[in-house]
Image: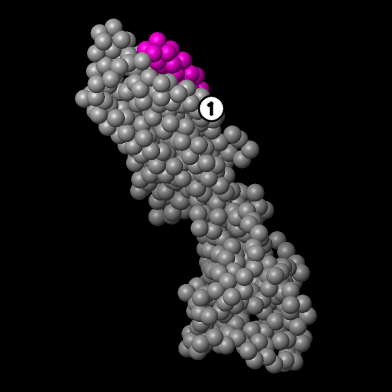
Amino acid sequence: MKRSILLLSGGLCKRTTYTGGNRHNQRCILAWGCSTLLAHRARSHYTFHAHIPTLRQKQGHLNQYKTNLTKEQIQQLLGQYRHTLDNPDHTLVTAKHCKRRYAITRDDLKQLHSPGQVQAKENPYGSDNRDLEQYWLKDVVKLAKDIHGVEALIERYRRYLESGQAEEETYRKVYGWSEIRKQMEIAVEQRAGTQQQQQQQNARSWRRIASLRGSVGKQPLGLNSVKQSFITNLGIFSTKLGVWFVTGSAAMFADCMHSCADVLNATYRYYGIHKAEGTPDAYHPYGHERKRFVFADRSACGVLVIGGLLPFLHGCHELNTPRELLLPGATIAVFCVSALLESLQVKKAYCEIQSLAKEKDVSVPEYLKSGSEIMSVSTFTEACVGMVCSMIGIVGVVAAWTTGAVFWDSLSGILIAGGVSAASAFLLHKNEAQLVGCCLPIDVVVRVTNRMIAEEVVTSVHDIKTEVYGVTAVRYKAEVIFNAEAITRRYLNLHSVPSTESQKLTEEVESLFRDAESPIQAQERVEDFMMRNNAIFLANLCTELNRLEKLVKDELRKAGYTGVHVDLEPW
């Protein structure tokens, strides 16, 4: 590692060269606070001759996330930058863009707060954040040239490109990049032999999708029925296991295995529900809703094997095994208690399903067939099957007791295994549809689309695609043809002629020619007027797009979907 201290204009800077293989990274950072700058990167402040250090590359591990610009590419970008300084376009830029590209601080931007120089726009990173202020690029470039000068700006931008910050700026825009970068740096340090104990922290990203966390502070869906299932089936399983050891009943063994599977599945689903409630992170920016279906699918496989296959094989074996049925009265009593306790689970799960069906405005049978909350449906299905299996067990034991033929006991065990297998097959089929993803109910789609078409600024809507990817998480995508005249009238407040607004517009157009010193200047003013108004129109088009997306979100939330992601594209 080579180090040299250079005195640069604007302050004392430290130039460090990291050597790894054939790659070299050079950076300039302020000497003051150098040892803590990386740890406080997010609070680092750009000055005219200082740069925030880019992500350090070690042993080539991070190269797949960052490449170096060639000299030809840098020269091409510098040419484009010079052209922007000479002839800036009529476009709006954010304060961060001003700071990174033109060394304009927020204090400098206070000079551009006269009427018409600032446009407020909804923050794209969450509805809870304040609006972003945008500035006209022409005003920003003029201010930067007055403060720093053209040559100084070009030299700064050249160092900005060479340092690699321009490339890392793209990575910063990726959701959760700061978290990914931190994990990569830890992995590199561990590979290099530096073992440090890292405290586990909750996933925190500098960007949040606020719309995905719709049920903060509420009880997770399906949790109550899963708790009830665990408590009930644990007691049932313990009792059935003891009775089976004493009596050797095939029907009791089959029902015991069913209860065993229910206990294990309740524990597994309880864990799965909490995993699915995790906040969005860098690798799962839309949350973990689908984990519900993954855990429910695995639990259904467990029920099929433990509660279906094993009792079926045991029942088939007992058909040809001569034995005596012991304590039939105790066996029947246990089956009766089991049916009673299973009914408590049915009631708890049914109440949850009924409330969910009411929110979606569908019947309970329809929700059992196509509803997205799989945990409550699974608990309800297995509890209903448990009640039926208990009835089958009672009939089989009574038949074996009265006829003296143990065959009926073994046959009831096989039937119980068949009922559990059928329930597992139903749940697996339902999980398959949820894992693959399905569209929103057509009536909801039509209602939301008609609400959007009713807006004055919308001419028509096309290519509507929807997907339910969780219990309450959905996506809505559509191509929208906007009414350009309606948007123009809205932002100009031009609804009739003559009016005060139309008079102001007429005077503004006439002044383009009246005050012009030459025809060329008049043409330049007309071009400037058209470009600026087109830029304003584009900004207002984006505003209308955001307003429509919020409208769609509100409509879908009324339909019971709390996590809504909307993509409307102008066509």
Q: Nearer the viewer, residue 54 or 483?
A: 54
Check the image and name the residue furthest to the left.
Answer: 320
Residue receiving disc 1 = 231
Q: How many marks?
A: 1
Q: Is residue 346 left or right of residue 305?
A: right
Evaluate whether residue 20 shows in this view: yes
Q: Name the image quarter holding residue 52.
A: bottom right
Report x, y in % for residue 161: 57, 82
- Identify the coloring: one colour
Q: Which residues are magenta?
A: 327-350
Q: Nearer the viewer, residue 204 or 59?
A: 59
Q: Is residue 322 left or right of residue 441?
A: left
Q: Residue at x 38, y 38 (%)?
A: 302
Question: How many residues crowd around disc 1 within 10 Å: few (fewer than 14), some, or many (20 or more)?
Answer: few
Q: Residue at x 47, y 22 (%)?
A: 239
Q: Is residue 492 left or right of residue 460?
A: right
Report x, y in % for residue 383: 42, 24
In which quadrant will I find the N terminus?
Answer: bottom right
Report x, y in % for residue 56: 59, 77
Give the vertical position of 351 relative to 111 (above or below).
Answer: above
SS type, badge 1? helix
Tell me if residue 431 is in the magenta stretch.
Answer: no
Evaluate whether residue 558 shows in this view: no
Tell me if residue 342 is in the magenta stretch.
Answer: yes
Give the vertical position of 95 relative to 239 (above or below).
Answer: below
Q: Nearer the viewer, residue 151 or 174?
A: 174
Q: Is the magenta region chiefly helix, strand or loop? A: helix
Q: What type is the residue that disc 1 sits on?
A: Ile
In which quadrant will I find the C terminus?
Answer: bottom left
Q: Name the image quarter holding residue 503.
A: bottom right
